[in-house]
């Protein structure tokens, strides 16, 4: 994503984002100057500047001619995140509580959506996590896993490389080899993942590029039990191989 698209994720329109980037780079500008620099009409420039002021991304300085100063990107994003957190807390209080999750099988498509679900499952873990995934994907969720370990929750990891995480139980497996293609190519498939939290929720599928990633999520006891048995059998095989190698 380029800077304009990233800023649009924070609630700016495309035109507002363009003007904001201009202000950040050029300093204080009038509406006329902004329109001239970007090659847009003055009415569009003033509308964008008014939007930036309204959304907390710019301030007005009323001197001989009105000029607009950009709020720093760090301050703007921090304020927006704080505001969204407040809205989130309000919604959680006001929206009716979700009914107990049923045992349907839900398909989650797209890498970002899968990663979001992954993080939320870890965040909501109460007792234990069993995770089978390549080390390259494991690194993406290291912070969340370390937090679980610090909270004295059981974390069992199966991954394809020697991996260090104090407090976690780690098994090295060969199952991910050759799933990702060349390690030097960005965007290659990271391979399969299997995640079980609290023996109640399961996420399984493939984490590849943005478009082709697909996973299945469910609280269905049959799926959870199936994945648990598969992981347990894999751990037994790893332990047997380690024991045989030591003889």
Image (tube, rainbow, N blue to C red):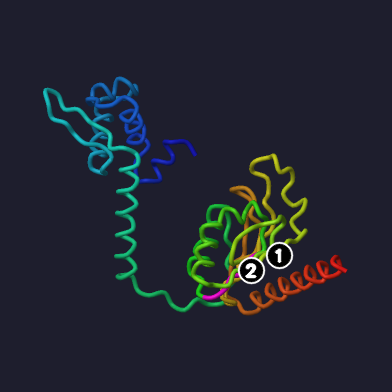
| Sequence-first disc among 2 and 1 | 2
- Write the residue at 30% across / 20% down: 36
Residue 136, placed above or below residue 146: above
Residue 121 in view (yes/no): no
Relative image position of residue 147 (x, y in whole percent): 50, 63
Please provide percent x and percent y for residue 193: 66, 61
What secondary structure is the stretch in magenta mostly built from?
strand
Quarter of the image for residue 229 reads bottom right
Pick whichever, 163 or 134, lies toward us: 163
What is the distance, in whole Å, between disc 2 and disc 1 at their CAs? Answer: 8 Å
Secondary element at image label 2: strand
Q: For this view, does 232 lie left or right of residue 143?
A: right
Task: Give me the residue at 31% from left, 43% from top.
Answer: 76
The answer to which quarter of the image holds residue 236 is bottom right
Q: Quadrant of residue 154?
A: bottom right
Q: Who's the residue at 14% across and 24% down the image?
A: 65
x%, y% of residue 227?
A: 68, 72
Pointer 2: residues within 10 angstroms few (<14), some, or many (20+)? some
Residue 213: image tag:
none
User: Please, is residue 10 above or below residue 168 in the view?
Assistant: above
Residues under numbered marks 2 and 1 in contact, where contact means CB atoms less than 8 Å apart = yes
Tell me the magenta residue range: 127-131
- Percent x, y for residue 199? 60, 77
Residue at which label 1 appears: 171
Which one is nearer the viewer's eye here, 135 or 71? Answer: 135
Along the viewing direction, whichever of 198 and 11 lies nearer the viewer: 198
Could you tell me which secondary element the residue under label 1 belongs to?
Answer: strand
Label 2 belongs to which residue? 156
125 left or right of 247 in image: left
Q: In this view, does 32 lie above or below 61?
A: above
Give the residue at the far front of this rendering.
247
Look at the image and tell me whether residue 203 can be seen.
yes
């Amino acid at each position: 994503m380029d800077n304009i698209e990233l800023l649009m994720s924070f609630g700016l329109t495309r035109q507002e984002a363009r003007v904001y980037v201009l202000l950040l780079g050029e300093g204080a500008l009038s509406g006329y100057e902004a329109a001239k620099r970007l090659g847009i009409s003055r009415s569009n420039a003033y509308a964008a500047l008014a939007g930036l002021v309204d959304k907390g991304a710019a301030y007005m300085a009323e001197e001989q001619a009105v000029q607009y100063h950009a709020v720093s990107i760090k301050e703007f994003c921090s304020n927006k995140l704080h505001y969204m957190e407040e809205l989130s807390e309000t919604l959680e209080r006001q929206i009716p509580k979700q009914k107990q999750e049923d045992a349907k099988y839900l398909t989650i498509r797209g890498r970002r959506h899968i990663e979001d679900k992954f993080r939320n499952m870890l965040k909501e873990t109460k007792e234990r996590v069993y995770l089978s995934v390549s080390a390259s994907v494991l690194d993406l969720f290291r912070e969340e896993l370390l937090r679980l370990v610090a909270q004295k929750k059981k974390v069992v990891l199966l991954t394809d490389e020697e991996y260090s995480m104090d407090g976690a139980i780690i098994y090295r497996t060969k199952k991910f080899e050759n799933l990702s293609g060349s390690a030097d190519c960005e965007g290659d498939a990271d391979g399969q993942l299997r995640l079980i939290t609290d023996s109640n929720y399961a996420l399984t599928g493939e984490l590849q590029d943005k478009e082709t990633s697909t996973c299945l999520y469910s609280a269905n006891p049959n799926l959870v039990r199936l994945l648990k048995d598969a992981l347990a059998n894999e751990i037994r095989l790893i332990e047997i191989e380690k024991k045989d190698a030591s003889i």
